[in-house]
Image (cartoon, rainbow, N blue to C red):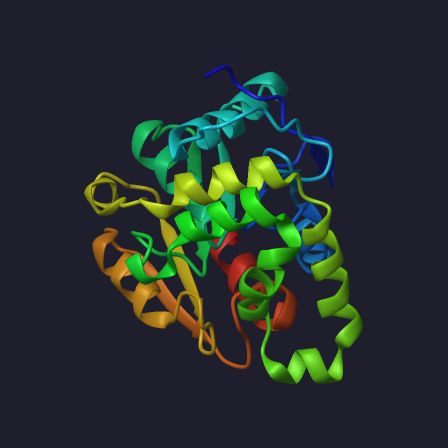
Amino acid sequence: MALIPLQYRLDGPRHAPVVLLVPPFGTKMSVWEPQMPELTRNRQVLRVNHRGHGFSPAPEGPYSVEDLALDILGVLEDLGFSRVSAVGGGFGGSLLLWIAANSPRTLERLALLAGTPRTPPMHRWDRIASRVRGSGLDSVTADVVLPWFTPDLTDDRPEVAARFTEDFGGIDPGAFASICDAVAGMDQRNLVSDVRVPTLVVSAAHDPLLPPGHGRRLADGLSGARFEVVSGAAHLLGVERADRVNELLVEHMAA
């Protein structure tokens, strides 16, 4: 499949080192807004939107994890960035794992938030895809969005949860279903041992989608990886606990 020209945005000092931010599927590049003030102090920050998210095109499926990862490499090539650091959220980080294993000179340092080496079989993203195709995106909104935040955030900052729910509703249904199919059978355990990039793995203590055990297994398979658990957050830990996540990212990128 041909590479898709993803929507991207570049912020920060023009000649500074570049850090690439890859969002979780179902969210747009705006999910990284809480990280921008810290990361743009001394880095260019490159953000992308996945296929069908924001203004990125939504070609007809099927998609594979490789297709989605190559889209990102295409953006880097078009911009002339041969080596960057990168942060991936949720299953978006799986694309960075693929890049780290298959294009090892591309990544200088890597951070994975709420990551996993394989999709848990009980998730049944294939069923989510079928429901989207049959009944539309609204039919799966609760299933997809509910794990993103703890009840505390939903109660105390309802406008945040509402904004992300609204963003999810604007995604192209066909593209999202094709991404779900790609994620459904993902198993990268055979790739993990090939990754030689200094890596930080961060899990959220209250993530119902990918609890910390997934991050621990991922970190255990990566040579020399650092593993951290952030309290008081669910799947979108970079939003709910931006203070702690920013601290870890800045420290890792500066190492």
From the viewer's perspective, is residue 148 above or below residue 156? Answer: above
Evaluate whether residue 63 shows in this view: yes
User: Residue furthest toward the top?
Assistant: 2
Image coordinates of residue 231 in percent, x first then y, are 50, 80
From the viewer's perspective, is residue 5 above or below residue 254? Answer: above
Residue under the image location 27 percent in, 44 percent down:
188
Image coordinates of residue 182 in percent, x first then y, are 40, 39
Residue under the image location 38 percent in, 71 percent down:
211
| 111 horizontally vs 249: left or right | left
From the viewer's perspective, is residue 32 above or below residue 145? Answer: above
Image coordinates of residue 20 in percent, x first then y, are 57, 40
Residue under the image location 61 percent in, 82 percent down:
151
| 5 horizontally vs 231: left or right | right
- For the N terminus, the quadrant is top left
Q: How many marks?
A: 0
Occupied quadrant, residue 144:
bottom right
Evaluate whether residue 85 shows in this view: no
Identify which residue, 84 or 114, lies in the foreground. Answer: 114
Identify which residue, 23 or 62, lies in the foreground. Answer: 62
User: Residue furthest toward the right?
Assistant: 159
Residue under the image location 23 percent in, 60 percent down:
220
Image coordinates of residue 139 in percent, x first then y, are 61, 57
Occupied quadrant, residue 174:
top right
| 185 horizontally vs 142: left or right | left
Identify which residue, 5 or 177, lies in the foreground. Answer: 177
